[in-house]
Amino acid sequence: MKPTKHFFLISIAVGCAAVLISCASTQSVSQNRESMLVASGFKVITPKTAAQKQKLQNLPAGSVTMMTKGKKKYYVFPDPAHNQAYVGGPKEYQIYQQMRADKKLAREDLQDAEMYQDTAMEWSVWGGGEGVWGPMGGPVPGGF
């Protein structure tokens, strides 16, 4: 297979992957975070008393808060819109943090792929292909 065709096919594959990933990432940020919390082992708790509901309303929105009850640590993510909270221990929180780190790396990989795709799309501006640049990337005599 010629290098130009190989490069073209790789560009198409990267483009398709980027489209699929971007479609999958249209899920809202809060739903995604809540899904990761549940996948990490956090339990969904619904406050039953007025005091519990008040505590839920007082927690900072959009972030996980560490709380201590007795000698145990708990991590709580409030979802006041749905009158619930996601609660986990240190083990679940560690898993959640690892999932967030993995997702960040995956997002960075996607950005790199998109950057390379953009570069590939500009290849024609340079007159791409062996005819101009030669088989090893160097210019062909009289080609430019």
Image (cartoon, grey):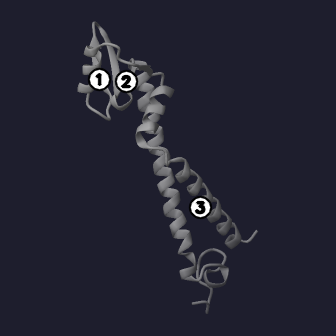
Give the position of the C terminus as an image quadrant: bottom right
Q: Amino acid at mark 2?
A: Ala
Residue 101: mark in rendering: none
Q: At 46% from the left edge and 38% from the top edge, which residue is drawn?
A: 32
Give the position of the N terminus as an image quadrant: bottom right
Residue 15: mark in rendering: 3
Left or right: where 54 falls relative to 137: left
Q: CA distance from mark 1 to mark 3?
A: 43 Å
Q: Amino acid at mark 1?
A: Leu
Q: CA distance from mark 2 to mark 1?
A: 7 Å
Relative to 115, residue 104 above or below: above
Picture coordinates of residue 63, whole percent (x, y): 31, 33
Relative to 20, residue 15 above or below: below
Splitting the image into 4 quarters, where does residue 92 fall?
Answer: top left
Q: Amino acid at mark 3?
A: Gly
Q: Nearer the viewer, residue 62 or 7?
A: 62
Relative to 65, residue 132 above or below: below
Picture coordinates of residue 82, whole percent (x, y): 39, 29
Q: CA distance from mark 2 to mark 3?
A: 39 Å
Observer-side mark, 1 or 3, equals: 1
Q: At 54% from the left edge and 64% from the top edge, which residue is drawn?
A: 117
Give the mark count: 3
User: Is disc 2 placed on a helix, strand or loop?
Assistant: strand
Q: Which residue is mark 1?
A: 56
Q: Residue furthest bottom?
A: 142
- Of pointers 2 and 1, the one earlier in the residue sequence: 1
Q: Which residue is mark 2?
A: 85
Tell me whether the residue at label 2 lies in contact with that at label 3, contact meaning CB atoms closer than 8 angstroms: no
Tell me whether the residue at label 1 lies in contact with that at label 3, contact meaning CB atoms closer than 8 angstroms: no
Q: At 67% from the left edge and 73% from the top edge, which residue is drawn?
A: 4
Label 1: few (<14), some (14–19) or many (≥20) C-alpha neighbours in 10 Å: many
